[in-house]
């Protein structure tokens, strides 16, 4: 009989918080700037509200590298699984929303199911098109199997499988899904299914019309890697495109670009060594909004490559009394910027 009193020898792999905070990680890539990162996301709305028009347009914009509501996009190959539409209908929609369809925007109106052929099909497509950035599945229900499992467990399992696939391939997967008919003041509570769906997704987008007969709607955006925002949209009946309603002045959502701020500062002083708090204090007169030292330190740590490209070397290390940041002006890499960042050459 085995001896159950033997000490456990399994090794628990850990990292201390001080080391972790000094470890540079690659920032999460965004396929739509500050709105849609890599990972798994869901877009929900009532039936016939215009979700398919929206996702088809998103695929075209990203495939062409053109802005989405004034947000810059990363030009990538896209795959739109239009599982509720014929190619004839999709062709008609393309003629409505664009003058010239992108050769980088692929479409398919059949697909396997989660846990069956779907994951293999997506992996094969990405292998054949290495620049793939976005896969849209319209709709989620079309790729799910009918099971007798617990509803939450089923939702969590299916969404978890797609989340793992998106992370493995380093792509964005956007699932089109429906809302419940019951009204709720919180749009997320109207998503059809259990919290296994909204909890598994990195970002939840919920499109809700202001009135059923109205062409205006609000896109509620909530996620792990984006700031919460509500985007007012209007459906243009002539172009069949969801257009943003606010003016640029009304929606100025400029993020704290600490990289540009630091590059300008180091371009003038040449060198800095000190804490994040001390750096924030020096930068504050140059910034209209309050600078949070912790956010500043994280932003610089995650953008070391961009700092170096702009002519600034960044190092983060632990001293006896605190964690120090060292910034040094260097010769910028050749990037064709013609000095647009305002960094003078190293003497």
Image: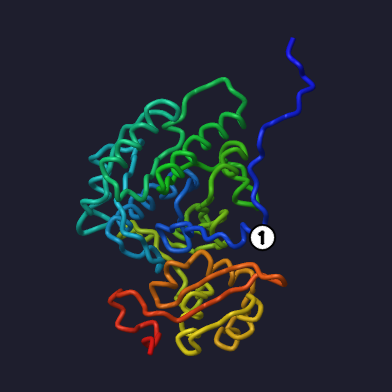
Identify the residue shown where x is 47% and y is 38%: 162
Could you classify mark 1 by the number of other residues whose Cα lies within 10 Å: few (under 14), some (14-19), or many (20 or more)?
few
Say above or below: 211 vs 88: below
Which residue is disc 1 drawn over?
A: 18
Could you say where residue 236 lies in the image, as x and y percent from the top left?
A: 36, 61
Q: Element at badge 1? A: helix
Say above or below: 231 vs 89: below
Could you say where residue 104 lies in the image, as x and y percent from the top left?
A: 24, 51
247 displayed left or right of 76: right
Could you say where residue 151 lies in the image, as x and y percent from the top left?
A: 60, 29
Q: In the current view of this chain or complex, which residue is farthest to the top? A: 1
Q: Nearer the viewer, residue 135 or 45?
A: 135
Q: Using the rendered view, name the quadrant where residue 179 is placed.
A: top right
Identify the residue shown where x is 30% and y is 83%: 338
289 displayed left or right of 84: right
Q: Please identify the quadrant where the C terminus is shown.
A: bottom left
């Amino acid at each position: 009989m085995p001896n159950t009193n033997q000490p456990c020898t399994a090794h628990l792999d850990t990292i201390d918080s001080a080391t972790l905070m000094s470890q540079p990680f690659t920032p999460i890539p965004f396929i739509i700037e500050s709105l849609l990162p890599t990972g798994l996301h869901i877009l929900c709305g009532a039936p016939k509200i215009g979700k398919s028009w929206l996702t088809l347009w998103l695929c075209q914009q990203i495939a062409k590298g053109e802005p989405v509501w004034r947000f810059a996009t990363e030009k990538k190959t896209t795959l739109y699984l239009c599982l509720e539409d014929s190619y004839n209908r999709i062709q008609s929609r393309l003629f409505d929303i664009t003058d010239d369809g992108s050769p980088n925007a692929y479409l398919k109106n059949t697909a396997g199911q989660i846990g069956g052929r779907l994951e293999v099909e997506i992996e094969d497509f990405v292998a054949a098109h290495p620049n793939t950035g976005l896969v849209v599945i319209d709709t989620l229900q079309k790729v799910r199997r009918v099971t007798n499992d617990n509803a939450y467990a089923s939702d969590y399992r299916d969404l978890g499988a797609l989340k793992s696939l998106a992370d493995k391939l380093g792509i964005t997967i956007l699932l089109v899904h429906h809302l419940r008919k019951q009204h709720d003041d919180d749009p997320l509570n109207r998503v059809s299914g259990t919290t296994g769906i909204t909890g598994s997704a990195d970002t939840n987008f919920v499109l809700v019309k202001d009135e059923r007969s109205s062409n205006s709607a609000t896109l509620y955006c909530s996620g792990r890697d984006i700031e919460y925002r509500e985007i007012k949209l209007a459906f243009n009946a002539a172009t069949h495109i969801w257009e943003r309603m606010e003016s640029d002045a009304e929606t100025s959502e400029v993020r704290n670009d600490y990289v540009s701020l630091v590059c300008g500062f180091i371009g003038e002083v040449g060198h800095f060594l000190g804490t994040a708090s001390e750096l924030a204090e020096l930068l504050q007169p140059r910034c209209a909004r309050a600078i949070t030292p912790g956010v500043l330190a994280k932003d610089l740590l995650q953008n070391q490559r961009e700092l170096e490209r702009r002519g600034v070397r960044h190092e983060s290390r632990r001293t006896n009394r605190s964690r120090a940041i060292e910034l040094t002006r260097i010769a910028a890499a050749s990037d064709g910027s013609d000095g647009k960042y305002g960094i003078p050459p190293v003497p």
